Amino acid sequence: MDIKEICLRALTYQDIDKTLQWHNDTNIVDFYSGHPFPVNLEMERKWYEKILTSDFPTSVFGIEHVKDQKLIGITVLRDINMINRNAECGIYIGDKAYLGRGLATDALELIVRFSFMKLGLNRIFAIIRADNISSIKLFEKIGFEREGILREHVFKDGTFIDQIIFGLLRKQIDEIS
Ligand SMILES: CC(C)(COP(=O)(O)OP(=O)(O)OC[C@H]1O[C@@H](n2cnc3c(N)ncnc32)[C@H](O)[C@@H]1OP(=O)(O)O)[C@@H](O)C(=O)NCCC(=O)NCCS
């Protein structure tokens, strides 16, 4: 396995100021969570309580830049289904200084590997806005395939926008160590 600049780790309460800021950043929220509501410290704390006391069926990882010892983003598996062995995957780079450096690609590779090799999942999918070019490039680069379109599924600033479902199957991945 190649050495990566980043690793995935559990979040801790020390991360809360950073993630609170990111969860109010429209560049992230519009594409990642999709809801238009502001988040306050109390709501963020409640979210931490939930994810830190139970990691199932949602599993949240901080993306840590190893050399800089800095949290730079988050990747998540939602609605992990151990009967059908699938989950939805999401990712964002919150610290803009680390955007466009291939680190989201590395983090997505790690969460894919975790999903297939540690959780034993068979399929991971992502639902991505049709106008989210960087995200589409990212998921296609890893091998996710376009499976379908949710027509006008998102309402944003007065317009309905399509979303694309991308899926990756365990059998598509040849070399997972
Ligand atoms: C999507 C996101 C995680 C990508 O982060 P990133 O740091 O740009 O990712 P990487 O550097 O690993 O690049 C991934 C690919 O996207 C391409 N890309 C990145 N930004 C781009 C842009 N503005 N336009 C076109 N392509 C872009 C890169 O070129 C790269 O492909 P390549 O290696 O073939 O050149 C980041 O833009 C983000 O956090 N967006 C907001 C949240 C979001 O949309 N999440 C995804 C939905 S779950």
Image (cartoon, rainbow, N blue to C red):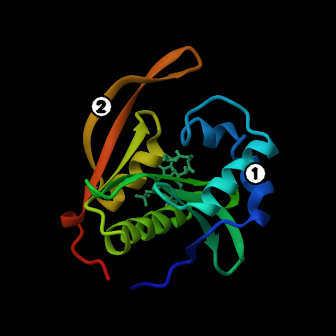
Q: Measured from the top left, where is residue 168 in percent x and y?
A: 28, 56
Q: Measured from the top left, where is residue 5 in percent x and y?
A: 57, 77
- Residue 72 falls in image quadrant: bottom right
Q: Measured from the top left, where is residue 50 in percent x and y?
A: 63, 54
- Above or below, 5 against 169 in this view is below
- For the point 80% across and 44% down, the residue is 42
- Can residue 94 be seen here? no
Please tell me which residue lies in front, 117 or 91. Answer: 117
Q: Which three-letter amino acid code belongs to the residue tagged 1?
A: Arg
- Quarter of the image that includes the C terminus: bottom left
- Above or below, 169 against 69 in this view is above
According to the picture, the residue beneath numbered tag 1 turns out to be: 45
Neighbourhood count class around disc 2 (C-alpha, 10 Å): few under 14, some 14–19, many 20 upward: some
How many marks are shown on the rendered structure? 2
- Can residue 112 be seen here? yes
Q: Which three-letter amino acid code belongs to the residue tagged 2?
A: Ile
Neighbourhood count class around disc 1 (C-alpha, 10 Å): few under 14, some 14–19, many 20 upward: some
- Above or below, 151 against 123 in this view is above
Q: CA gap, disc 2 to disc 1?
A: 35 Å
User: Which residue is at the far left?
Assistant: 171
- Above or below, 149 against 119 in this view is above
Task: Name the disc covering residue 149, or none.
Answer: 2
Asked if disc 2 and disc 1 are in contact, CB closer than 8 Å, the reply is no
* Disc number lying in front (2 or 1): 1
- For the point 55% across and 34% down, the residue is 34
Q: Measured from the top left, where is residue 76 in percent x and y?
A: 51, 56
Task: Name the disc covering residue 71, or none.
Answer: none
- For the point 54% across and 66% down, the residue is 103
